Image (tube, coloured by chain):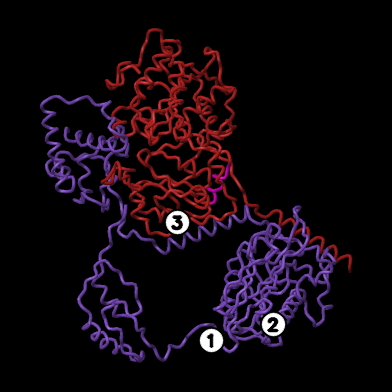
Chain colours: A red, B purple
Amino acid sequence: MEFWKWVLVLIALTLFGEIRIGAEQPRQTERISGSAGDVLEDDPVGRLKVFVYELPSKYNKKILQKDPRCLTHMFAAEIFMHRFLLSSPVRTLNPEEADWFYTPVYTTCDLTPNGLPLPFKSPRMMRSAIQLISSNWPYWNRTEGADHFFVVPHDFGACFHYQEEKAIERGILPLLQRATLVQTFGQRNHVCLNEGSITIPPYAPPQKMQAHLIPPDTPRSIFVYFRGLFYDVGNDPEGGYYARGARAAVWENFKDNPLFDISTEHPTTYYEDMQRAVFCLCPLGWAPWSPRLVEAVIFGCIPVIIADDIVLPFADAIPWEEIGLFVDEKDVPNLDTILTSIPPEVILRKQRLLANPSVKQAMLFPQPAQPGDAFHQILNGLARKLPHDPSIYLKPGQTVLNWTAGPVGDLKPW
Amino acid sequence: MKQLALLQQQNANRRSNSFRGVLDGAGEGPIKSPAALFWLILHGLCCLISLVLGFRFSRLVFFLLFSPTSITNSSSTSTATIINLAGTLANESPAVLSPANRTVAATTGSRVVVGRHGILIRPWPHPNPEEVMRAHRILERVQKEQRLQYGVKNPRNLIVVTPTYVRTFQALHLTGVMHSLMNAPYEVTWIVVEAGGVTNETAALIQKSGIRTIHIGFDQPMPATWADRWRVEDLMRILALRLVRDRKLDGIVMFADDSNMHSLELFDEVQKVNWVGAVSVGILVHSGDPEEPLPQGENPDNEGSSLPIQGPACNSSEKLVGWHTFDAMPYADRSAVFIGDMGTVLPRKMEWAGFVLNSRLLWTDGVDKPDYIKDLDSLGNEGVESPLSLLKDPSVVEPLGSCGRKVLLWWLRVEARADSKFPPGWVINTPLEITVPAKHTPWPDVPPELPSNMQVTAAEHEQPLVEQHIVAKRPPKTRSKKRSSRSKKKRDARETEMQFSSRHQGEK
């Protein structure tokens, strides 16, 4: 009798143990793959070769020396990309075997006392750099720049103006029409975004963000979080221009809603608060992109992107529709209905995708570079465009670009 | 078109001028032709007129003059429906004006248009309670998932033992404990032991909790002195432990006295206990005498902190070496003897509340139970001072809360006088017989005396008489911007409704 009792107990324990083990273990992260496949963790070494032109230091080092603030503002990607390429294994010193050519010119480093970049000299600087490389090396004229890439992280990319109407008027600098542009600006069907450009995230200082991490078991108790301007009184006193009225609409509709923690303050706990929020608003400002997207991804807060037709960084490698939420600007008054009617399983899935470390790594520009970071994603993007189409190689003497196109002021030497 | 271009330039200049200094001259050359000069003068004139008027009337003019010809069929991302509350000037129905000054972004049919857009505001821009509830459910689900992933794996049930008895402050203390337990994200079994037997009052209080409750009675009534009360409470706790043993309840046994305050982190921390654990208890010593000066806390046990703590003491290698206890010397002459008297209530050497036990320690035939606990039945009737006496060897206690550095609960004993009267459960169900209005009214010029001893039972037709009396005396004063918040008296609401202002201007 005793023996059978023990047998029964044994069987019961094993069954119980199996049920316990087979139960649903909470999945922590999920693999991510975008339209180009599961490419976030690809290693670009061996897939492409980049030749870095040696420009005189007045194009890069001297500008940086004049204003070291360029290393910390959100356009610092151009400087860090140069430094990364100089010591990267994809760099080659033999231009004959290079697939891509990089020109290190810091066009966004002319800052006002407030720290905002002035783009007025940038077209001339770029022209001057291109004239230099086309006269000293034969590779520009070979393809008129089709196998060259430039980093232009300014507001509207290579249109070189901070104001959208002016930028559209200028269009992309004519000399860069055939080159691949690596820029932060991205909007579909916009003059300043060429087909085949690579969109990158704005620079956000990685150490500063890592220093503000809080324990992950802190419960997320804020529903929607946003800190920033709603009205730009200095530049748009009437309202309606800034952010196409979308930020003002957010304020007017939700300023007394307890679920929306929105204000114009600059709290010291900004990063910690983002980690306690479920949704973080990333509305457009004067330009559609913003560092808030990077911060939201790093801190695991689902980004709610309010910018019509925006193209997000590395859109072919990261499936943004599955990670974040896109809200049309005309739907902003119904934002609370939209957000509260999302099923919880969808929200949990988005959080799982955000917890994937490869997504977070892809948004950062760490010093020194780490595998899977934004530098590598840029190189992966360039590698995916290889091999070059043979039609880009021009016959000797053939020219496609018009060197005298553009506003008269651009043609002055720099 | 020239006007439009001029307006755009106006905008451009405004941004660059105010934002980045007057640097825009690099792009534009000087304007020299007479036509351009004429337009410049006209532009200046328009600016002066706008300055005088206070808003930009030029848009209005252009709309009126040019609207039949300049309707662009660009997408109406903004003009569809809306009210613009941009806040300051130019409130001349700008929603209708926008077609006159749009620029289409690109010719390739982009639906995003550059230029001025209206600010979309829905007709009732206030929160919807259903949506708020849904959002809270989403937050709950997210937090549950966070706990699953990062919190305690395999959380154990909590078995909470609370001795109580019916007295004035019972509702206050017991509700506090009850709400703490309701908020703890674990399964709770609450054993409420009541001195003097089970009463309906206590049962009514605890039935609203929604957690599993075991309400048992203890035969003796609660005595009147503190010393006896500690003794009876010990016996009640032993009774509860016997219940745990007999019913083979599984979980972590905690002692939550009904006047203590518990932090929710305590419930997370006790999950780490193996067999017996100890947490630090903050002692809030309080005297019943309001005149007594606050004691200058000098407790040599704690470095620098003036708050007495009871709990485990560790050495630098995080091992238990001793105990912090409360130093009762400064209060020896003032200590309270009877429950509810004016002296200072002192805690005992070690409070039960600072200890937690694994319930399997109490089972008689637990699997791999350590043998350092005495059998409950062997204690007899003399009671136990603290769980340490239950153990044969007090050094096996595990210190919790980063070795006692975190104070996770607070001990406080506040009781009313034994003869104080109180409504059961602190609920006044029947309306009061007599109401005496306050003598002080918010209007300083109304004479303060009001008819006293009004019978509220005849309230309805009393009110108009009183109202007329008051209205006649109040001088007509308009209060345009004040919002009355007194909802008690009906006559206030009626007066101030008329003086209610419209919604004040939103801030930027």
| Residue B422: numbered disc | 1
Chain bearing tag 1 is B
Kindly tell me whether residue B122 is visible in this rendering.
yes
Quick check: B268 left or right of A70? right
The amino acid type, in three-letter code, at marker 1 is Phe
Q: Is residue A11 above or below residue B80?
A: below
Magenta segment, prevailing SS (helix, strand or loop): helix
Q: Which residues are magenta?
A: A348-356
Q: Nearer the viewer, residue B40 or A137?
A: B40
The amino acid type, in three-letter code, at marker 3 is Thr
| Residue A256: numbered disc | none
Residue A108 located within the stretch drawn in magenta: no
Give the CA distance from mark 2 to mark 3. Answer: 52 Å
Residue that extends furthest to the top in the rendered view of this protein: A396
Quick check: A262 left or right of B236? left
Residue B397 quadrant: bottom right
Kindly tell me whether residue B251 is visible in this rendering.
no
Give the percent coordinates (x, y) of residue B19.
31, 37
Disc 3 to disc 1: CB gap under 8 Å: no
Residue identified by numbered label 2 = B229
Give the percent coordinates (x, y) of residue B413.
62, 76
Residue identified by numbered label 3 = A340
Mark 1: few/some/many CA within 10 Å (<14, 14-19, 20+): few
Q: Nearer the viewer, residue B301 or A167?
A: B301
Give the CA distance from mark 3 to mark 1. Answer: 45 Å
Residue under disc 3 on the same chain as residue under disc 1? no
